């Protein structure tokens, strides 16, 4: 079991080159099934989710190989139309293969997808849309059996919610379907426009890419192409939050500045100075961040839900109180309990989190609860005093390529180590061991007031507010526990 050991309290400064977007690479890999010609995806990130997608392609009979930062796919020998349950459970985005397999093979068999536990994320929008295009879909013992007896055909489809995954599935299925498909209330995320760009290069006829209404005229066949994956806007926002939390300055290279517009106002409200030029962005933070009053996640061009967790972690050390409202997923705040262990003051009620900034956090032992929640723990650990040890790193590996190297290049003291289950790393200092134990013993690593509540141990709210802050944090943890129990 690997762990991430972070010695916090160090200002981060320097340059980071942003990798290709995970949320773009996965549907692009699925779309390579539509042509027998070779496709090359440049700037593809080396992530565990990408590895899963490549294993799915190989299982289906494709050749999928890495060549430096390029993935080459040859789908001229597709011989299967099923995806093993184990691969489906490894990532939620595996459902995007449904439309591609149906379009290529005329039938598909796959189980329900896995991925991060963020509450119910029903795939009914995917299924109902494909049914309108001629698919017959039956469920038996948790497996979806899909076929298109008369082939896929165009249809008029209106999504009740601008689902990114459903939009991707419809687009992929529609480009080689007979007739014209008109998709209304489509998702407008940059990753959707990137998928449309790739499909257009392959010979598809798509009008309105990146808009709420997209029209697709089906073609008989597609050809291969070389395509560059767009930069990862969520990775960029994560590094902005990490550097800002330490009061540092960072230059982000290889970014699409327009894609970062939805998150920029929040950083500017926190007191960060942002400068744009070409494909680069400079973010310079003040010595103490200001509060961000309200962050409400919304479909693009609103604030992205995936960037909310790193920003919330940044706000735990800001001056003042901010409110986060999650409108996309039901169980986004599981990581809040881990931040509270570090001394953060967070109250969670349903989809709302109230964050009261503290002068400092304290290092301890925590575990990633999901991909973006893990990123939030990294941001908090960099700003905290002392050493933080983060477990369950497989979540981070799904969406961040070489995060350890990037943070180390910025001046962070970050080390990824192997550790046996249930034991501390052999190279840990005695202070780190004490910090990890004290969380469970009810003692803060830098205090010896055994038996005090979380608010008292964390400190920083002011003497007159400590008792209230303690109950706030306990409330937040209780709410998380109750919601986790309900979701199951």
Image (cartoon, helix red, strand yellow):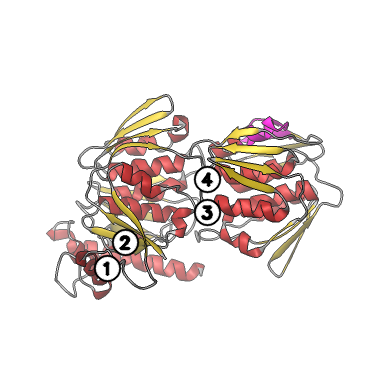
Q: Which residue is mark 3?
A: 48
Q: Residues within 10 Å of mark 4 (few under 14, many from 20)?
A: many
x and y, in percent, of residue 156 in the image: 74, 40
Marks 2 and 1 in Cβ contact (< 8 Å): yes
Q: Residue furthest front?
A: 67
Q: Earlier in the sequence, mark 1 or mark 4?
A: 4
Does 187 sit above or below residue 477?
A: above
Q: Residue at x 73, y 31 (%)?
A: 203
Which residue is disc 1 drawn over?
436
**Separation of residues labelled 1 and 3 (CA atoms):** 28 Å
47 horizontally vs 386: left or right: right
| Residue 274 at x, y percent in the picture | 33, 31
- Does residue 209 show up magenta in the picture? yes
Residue 389's tag is 2
Q: Residue 41 magenta-drawn?
A: no
Labels 3 & 2 near each other (Cβ < 8 A): no
Find numbered disc 2 in the image and state the secondary structure of the residue it sits on: strand
Residue mark closest to the camera, 1 vs 3: 3
Camera sees residue 121: yes
């Amino acid at each position: 079991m690997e762990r991430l050991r972070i010695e916090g309290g160090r200002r981060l400064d320097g340059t980071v080159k942003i990798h290709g977007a995970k949320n773009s690479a996965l549907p692009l890999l699925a779309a390579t099934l539509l042509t027998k010609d070779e496709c090359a995806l440049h700037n593809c990130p080396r992530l565990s989710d990408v590895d899963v997608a490549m294993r799915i392609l190989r299982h289906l009979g494709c050749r999928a190989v890495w060549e430096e930062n390029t993935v080459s796919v040859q789908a001229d020998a597709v011989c299967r139309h099923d995806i093993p349950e184990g691969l489906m459970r490894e990532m939620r985005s595996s459902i995007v293969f449904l439309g591609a397999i149906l379009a290529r093979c005329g039938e598909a068999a796959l189980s329900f997808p896995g991925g991060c536990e963020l509450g119910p994320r029903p795939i009914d929008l995917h299924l109902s849309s494909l049914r309108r295009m001629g698919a017959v879909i039956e469920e038996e013992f948790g497996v979806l059996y899909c076929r298109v007896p008369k082939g896929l055909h165009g249809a008029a489809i209106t999504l009740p919610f601008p689902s990114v995954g459903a939009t991707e599935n419809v687009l992929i299925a529609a480009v080689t379907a007979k007739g014209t498909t008109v998709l209304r209330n489509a998702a407008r995320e940059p990753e959707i426009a990137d998928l449309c760009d790739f499909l257009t290069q392959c010979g598809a006829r798509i009008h309105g890419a990146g808009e709420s209404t997209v029209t697709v005229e089906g073609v008989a066949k597609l050809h291969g192409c070389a395509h560059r994956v767009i930069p990862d806007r969520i990775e960029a926002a994560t590094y902005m939050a990490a550097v800002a939390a330490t009061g540092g300055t960072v230059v982000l290279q290889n970014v699409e500045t327009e894609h970062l517009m939805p998150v920029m106002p929040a950083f500017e409200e926190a007191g960060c100075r942002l400068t744009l030029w070409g494909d680069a962005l400079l973010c310079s933070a003040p010595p103490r961040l200001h509060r961000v009053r309200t962050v409400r996640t919304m479909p693009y061009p609103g604030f992205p839900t995936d960037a909310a967790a790193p920003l919330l972690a940044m706000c735990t050390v800001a001056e003042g109180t901010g409110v986060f409202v999650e409108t996309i997923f039901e169980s986004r705040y599981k990581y809040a309990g881990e931040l509270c262990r570090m001394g953060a003051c967070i109250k969670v009620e349903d989809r709302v989190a109230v964050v009261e900034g503290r002068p400092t956090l304290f290092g301890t032992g925590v575990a990633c609860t999901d991909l973006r929640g893990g990123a939030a723990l990294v941001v908090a650990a960099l700003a905290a005093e002392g050493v933080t040890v983060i477990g369950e790193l497989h979540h981070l590996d799904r969406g961040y390529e070489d995060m350890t190297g990037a943070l180390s290049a910025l001046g962070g003291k970050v080390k990824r180590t192997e550790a046996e289950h249930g034991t501390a790393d052999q190279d840990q200092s005695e202070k780190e061991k004490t910090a990890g134990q004290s969380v469970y013993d009810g003692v803060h690593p830098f205090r010896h007031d055994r038996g005090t509540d979380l608010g008292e141990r964390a400190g920083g709210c002011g003497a007159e507010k400590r008792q209230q802050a303690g109950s706030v944090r306990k409330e937040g943890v209780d709410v998380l526990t109750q919601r986790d129990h309900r979701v199951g």
